[in-house]
Amino acid sequence: MDDNNEEILGYSTRHALIKLRNDISGVIEEYKKKIPTGFRLARDIISFSSEKVLLSGVAYTITLIYIVCLLLTYLFGVSVQAHAYLLWEAFFLLIILIINFLVAFNEEYLYQNEIPHRVKKVLETMTKAINRVKWKEEYYPHLCAPYSPCVTLQWTYRDGTIVNLPWALLVEGDVIVLRPGQEVPGHCKGLQPNDPELFFGQTYQPNSQNKEHCTIPHIRVPHQNKAYKMCETPYLKNLKMALEQATTRPVTVFEKQRYLCTVKVMEGIVLPLVISLVVVASFLRHVYHLPGVTHWTEIYFLQTIAASLPLLQIVFPIAWVTLNCYGLARFKQIAETRQKYVRPKSCSISEDASDPLLQALSESSLKPESIKSLAKTFFNILTGREDMVSRTANIVHVLGSLSALSCVDKKGILSWPNPTPEKVFFLRNSDPTSHNSSKTSLAGSLGHPGDSVLEQPDNRHHEPSTVVEVLDLTHDQNAPFCVEFDDQRWRRHLALLKPLGLAALLNTCAPAPRHTYAHFCAHLTCEAQLSEDLVPVTNRRCLCELAKQIGFTDSVADAYSVQHCLSIFRHLRADTIRRETRFVRSLQLSTRVKVPLPHMLAVLVKDHANQLQMLTQGTADIVLDSCVDYWNGRDLTPISASDRKKIIDFYQRNSLTAYCTAFAYKPVTRGVSSPVADMYLEVPAEGRGGLAPRTQHWPDAPALHFHSTDSLLFNEVTDDDVVDADGYFDLQCNQVFIGMVTMQYQAQSDMVELIERLERACIRFVHFSKENELRSRVFSEKMGLESGWNCHISLMSDTEARWVLHTALLAIGGRTLGKVHFVMSRCLG
């Protein structure tokens, strides 16, 4: 970022919170002016056309007429039936009518003011935070916290420091820092006159460098962050939308059925029809002097009231509201009990009384403290003081009429917030005896015959072959990140796993590379936008638990000091992308699959012996191109063409369904100057075949392609620091391949149990996924969903569908027309 932007301090936390509170209060006050009051509110309460009406104006009118009729019968009746009880009946009807009106008024008032009341509680919490809390920088999320769709964070100046502020706390006038490729949180303007004005949803794209065809390694200046000033408070837009849509939500199925039965049918059709028939019958009886009661008040009033009063259902609104409040209170009690319950690992899901969960729920409802809590919750819901939405959205009605449940996201809801290791890939020799040590290989390459040279004829007959080893890991459902190896004999591969665990601790999980990797990911996001077939994949995930499972502790990282973090990437040519996606196109998927942008991050660390080592992680294609050997647990073995094919095949197949990260290692004898280390290296977009060094520092050793530990011990090499692109590039060449780790989002056990119970209740679960078909299918299988043929529907646009159809037709070539129709049906949904 520019130097002059460092002087911008922005708001203090107290000032920003006060401004946010005042802005929210202003929106609430403006909304309250639109809430109907007086006659408008009374009209909504008795409106016959409203589906939320409890007792319509027809019922109120008829009840008032009945009260008047009872009073007239009491005053003018002459028979013995015209006693004082008629007066009490009229009084009782009046009381019931008033109670119904007050209940309806209370429900309508709480319905109109439910969201403002909840916002008022938020304002009270903000006021307490303003007056009591002393905000510090460590209270905010880390600046390099991984992206999560659950919480949107924005770099913002607060109290003179850049903090990772939740998006909802931004206010108008805040000075924010936009990173390259970041989505803009709201309308904002640049601090410089030439800065473009940005709006919500746009992507901040800095001025790109010249993207000529790269044939040699180039040093690229990282895209810089930029300070902008907010021109609006983003939260207010969501608040206004919530207030406007709160009273326009569609009514539930039960509300529709109640309105249809009690209002439209009973009050609109049956009640007028019965009254008309009774009045006609009374008229005929009075005209023809039929035997029975003879006074006209009893004939026209009492008999009509006796025949039609049960159809008024004047007690039903009170019962409806009471049962709704009780159902919500009971639901909250069950939800709180379920949150405290932990299902044993060996316990299976059952619907009978032996299910521990059902037993826990039934036992909790019988406890005296549970009954008191239920009564308190019921009263709070009835009066609108409970901290839950009960009028604008009734969860009991929704769950009671549920036929399908949909979820639009998985991270933190269906799955744990972060992926966990699922597979560990590495290469080993079939023969445990190594015939090619690093020391003798180095001696042979320098022209000094060793024992291995003398035994070379025997090695031809005993040359070990390369074996691919894949270890599966299982996620602990009771812990967010804990994993365990499925194979009980995994310790026999400990020599192969230790370098990978050390690389994870010093690169993936080390605090030092966080800022470098965060800026590098932002740079990759901008680079990926130059091609519609590339996608930036941030593979830097937490692997601490895997390292601990291997045997490392956190104190191991204290023995090393990070010197520099080096960032390398490259673009892919069109023919390379077609080759990369050939396997994907052959699957005839209905979604477009993009290729990860090749990149890697290398950290230079120094141990207590002042020896420099480089640990690299990134996408397997570029990491593999930089490697010439692999670690077999005892020594280094050259990577053959078949070995490269095995690694790439594993990477291509697993990167479609998981996050695949490759690791490499190299001892080095030279460092990197700070100005060069702060830059990024773009390597040529050439085909595979390895990254060959562009310079040769040992003219007498043309076959030397790596520095082994032995060479560092017995050969004092003092090279100057890297100061140019060629040296930067050569430093990345001739690395040692360690292995790969695939990571996957694991379904939460609660969601798996929920889906199973929904299936037993004949409720369909629908998962809307933003990811490609293969990755969505794998995760759906983890949740227990059916993911076979014809279970995936693409919601892509017509343009994307035509592109997928075109590539699919190219992939299937001259296959049968029936398969073409199959591809078209899958592409067009």
Image: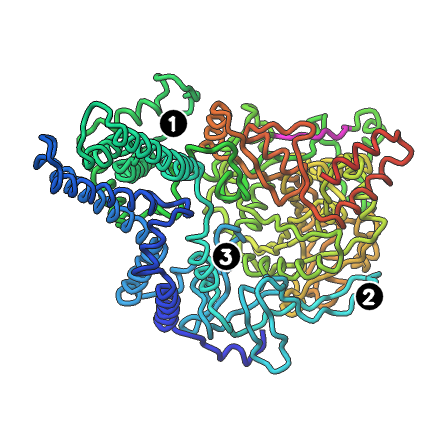
Q: Quadrant of residue 294?
A: top left
Magenta stretch, residue numbers = 464-471
* Nearer to me, 1 or 153: 153
Residue beneath the point at 79% across and 37% down: 824
Q: Amino acid at mark 3?
A: Thr
Q: Amino acid at mark 2?
A: Glu
- Say which residue label 1 marks: 343
Horizontal relation, residue 89 to residue 664: left or right: left
Horizontal relation, residue 650 to residue 9: left or right: right
Disc 1 or disc 2, which is closer to the eye?
1
Q: CA distance from mark 1 to mark 2?
A: 59 Å
Give the crowd class for mark 3: few <14, some 14-19, many >=20 residues within 10 Å: few
Give the crowd class for mark 1: few <14, some 14-19, many >=20 residues within 10 Å: some
Horizontal relation, residue 810 to residue 73: left or right: right
Residue 451 visible in image: no
Is residue 49 on the magenta stretch?
Answer: no
Residue beneath the point at 47% across and 59% down: 241
- Say which residue label 2 marks: 212
Q: Amino acid at mark 1?
A: Arg
